[in-house]
Amino acid sequence: MKRAVFLDRDGTINVEKDYLYRIADFEFIAGVPEAIKILNRAGIMVIVVTNQSGVARGYYTEDDVEILHRHIASELERTGAYIDAWLFCPHHPSGRDSYALPCNCRKPLPGMLKEASRRYNIDLHNSAMIGDKRADIEAGLAAGCRTILVRTGYGREEEPHVSHQAIVFDDLLSAVKCIV
Ligand SMILES: [Zn+2]
C-alpha cells in the first residue's frame, strides 16, 4: 500500500483569498513548490483535498475549479513538482440544486481521503493530512491519518481550537522537511 500526504489547498498551498477561482488571484505560499517536490522525490503521493463550496453557492463552476487546478499544476511543473491527484467537494448544505445534498466529502468529513485511499490503495494510517483549519485536522483524524496544522491561512486563529493530536508547523515547507 502507498503512503500519501493529503494537502488542503486554500491557506495551505496558496494564499487564502475568499472563494478563489481566478488564475490571476492565485499565489503560492512561499516554499510550497519546493515542499511538494520533496514529497515527490520521497515517493510519497501528494493528493489535494479541498472544499469548494463556492460551486454550490453559485460563485463559480466545477470547470473553473478544474481550470485553476490545471494552472497550479503547470506552475508546479516549472520547479519539477507535481500533484498526484486532485479531489474537491463542490457541495454545501445551503447550496443550489443538487449541490445541496448531504455529502460525505465536505471536510471535516473524511470522504475525500477515504475515496483516495480506495482509488489509489493508500494506507491511511501511514499517511498525513496537512491543512490550516480545524476541519482539515478533523477529517484527517476521522480517516485515521496523522495530522498537521500549518500556521499559514487561518492556521494561527485555528491553532487554539484544534485537537492536541495535531502537530503544528509554521508552513508547509517546514512540515514536509520534518516528516520526510
Ligand atoms: Zn461534498
Image: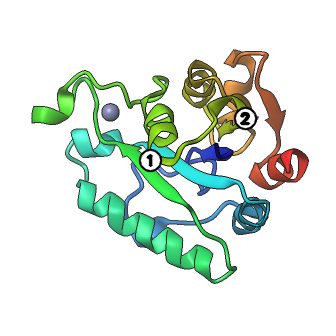
- Identity of the residue drawn at 50% across and 66% down: 26
Q: Is residue 76 above or below residue 20?
A: below
The picture places residue 108, in percent across and down from the top left corner, at 49, 24
Q: Amino acid at mark 1?
A: Asp
Q: Amino acid at mark 2?
A: Asn
The picture places residue 10, in percent across and down from the top left corner, at 54, 49
Label 1 or label 2, whichever comes before in sequence order:
1
Q: Quadrant of ligand 1?
A: top left
Q: Under tag 1, what secondary structure?
A: loop
Q: Is mark 1 within 8 Å of ligand 1?
A: no
| Residue position marked by numbered label 1 in the rendering | 18
Q: Is residue 116 above or below residue 173?
A: above
The picture places residue 82, in percent across and down from the top left corner, at 60, 69
| Residue position marked by numbered label 2 in the rendering | 126
Considering every residue shown, the one lying at the far left of the view is 97
Q: Quick one: 27 or 9, which is closer to the camera?
A: 9
Q: Is residue 60 above or below residue 69?
A: above
Labels 1 and 2 touching (C-beta < 8 A)? no
